[in-house]
Image: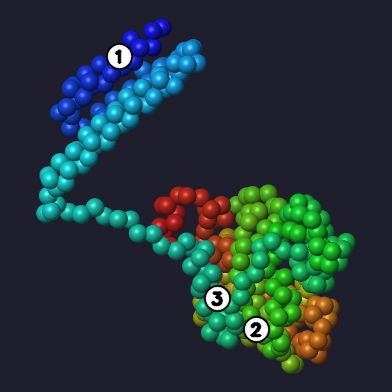
Amino acid sequence: MDWRSELKALEEALAELKEKYRQAVDPNVLEEVRVKFLGRKGPIKALLNFIREVPPHERRELGRAINEIKNAFETWIQEKRDQLGEKEEEIKDPTLPSRQNSLGHKHIISQTIAEIVDIFREMGFALADGPEIEQEYYNFTALNIDVTHPSREAFDTFYLNLPPDSDKGKYLLRSHTSPMQVRIMERFSPPVAVIVPGRVYRPDAVDASHSFMFHQIEGFLVDTDVRFSHLKGILMEFARKYFYDDVRLRFRPHYFPFTEPSAEVDISCLFCKGKGCSVCKYSGWIEVLGCGMIHPNVLAAVGGEYMAKTGFAFGMGVERLCMLKYRIPDIRLFYNADVRFLRQF
C-alpha cells in the first residue's frame, strides 16, 4: 500500500465531500458524513491503522498529514453546523407557543419526612442529622444491645471492611437512627428534645414491604421527671396531626433493648376508622411505631448529668407511614424511576 497515493485520495475525497454537501440543510446528514469519514470503518481510521506498517522514518510525516486532513474535516463540519444554526435562528417564529418545561418536585419520601419533622418541631423538638457510617459502640453497645443479640450478627447488619476503632469497635452502615440518642447526649446537657430523620440499612430481602435501605425517624426527650404519660401525649398529638383528628392509639407491651418499659403503638385504622377491613385485617388497628422510656443503661453510658434524668424515645419508619396514609401497596415503588407514580404526590 502506497500511503502517499492513499493520502492524496483522502484529500480528494474531502474536497468532493465539501462540494457535494455545500448546500446541506439537514444536521442529520452532516452527522452521517462525519461518522462515515471518521468512524471505525472510515478512511481516516484505515490510514491510522496502516501507520505501523510504514517505515519508522516516515511515520511522523504520515501521522502529521493525517491529522491535518482530520482537523480540516472537523473544522468544515463545525462551520456547516454553525451555518445551519444561524439559519434555524432566522426562521424562528416568535408568535409560536413556547416549549413547556417539565418542573420537578420533592419526592414523596422527602415530603413525608418534612411533614413529620414540622409536626415535632412545633412541639419543641430540635432537628438533628447523624452519620450513616456508624460504629458498634453507638449502634449497639451504648444502646444496651448485648454482644449476643442477633441484630449484631453479619446477617442482620452491613459491616464495613474498615479497620475497627480501638474504643468504638467495627464500622457499619447504621441499622437505625437511635445511635443519635447517645451522640446528642454526649454533646449537649439536658434537657434535650430531638428529632432525627435519616436513611438506615439492613440486609433484608427486597419484597413489597421490605428494602435493604429505608428511612427512619428517631425522636427522644430527656429531662427531669419525664414519664410515660408524656410520651403518650406527644405521640397522640403527632398521630392526630399526621393521620386524622379522631384517631385512637393503642399501646401494646413489647421489648426493645434500649427502652424499658417498651411498647408498640397501633392506630385505629385509617380506612375503616376501627370497624375492621382488609387493610387492618379486620382487627381495627394498624401498627405504626415503637417507643418506650429510655433504658437507665443508655443514660448510664452517657453518664454525668444524665444519670439523674429520665426520658422517652420513639422510632418510626417513614415508608410505612407514607404507605399507610396514601395506600401505597409496594415499598419498591418509592425507588423506581416511573414518573407516573411520582407525579401523583
| Residue ranking furthest to the right | 148
> What percent of the width, then of the height, locates residue 53?
49, 12
Secondary structure under the numbered disc 3 in the rendered image: helix
Q: Quadrant of the C terminus?
A: bottom left
Q: Residue at horizontal 66%, vertical 66%?
A: 131
Q: Residue at horizontal 71%, vertical 88%?
A: 190
In 3D space, how far apart are the residues under numbered discs 1 and 2 (Cα atoms)? Answer: 81 Å
| Residue ranking furthest to the top | 1
Which residue is denoted by mark 1 in the rendering? 8
Tell me if mark 1 has few (under 14), some (14-19) or many (20+) residues whose alpha carbon lies within 10 angstroms of its own: few
Q: Residue at horizontal 75%, vertical 92%?
A: 225
Which residue is denoted by mark 3 in the rendering? 117
In 3D space, how far apart are the residues under numbered discs 2 and 3 (Cα atoms)? Answer: 12 Å
Tell me if mark 3 has few (under 14), some (14-19) or many (20+) residues whose alpha carbon lies within 10 angstroms of its own: many
Q: Is residue 341 above or below residue 192?
A: above
Name which residue type carries label 1: Lys
Q: Is residue 136 above or below residue 93?
A: below
**Total count of labels:** 3
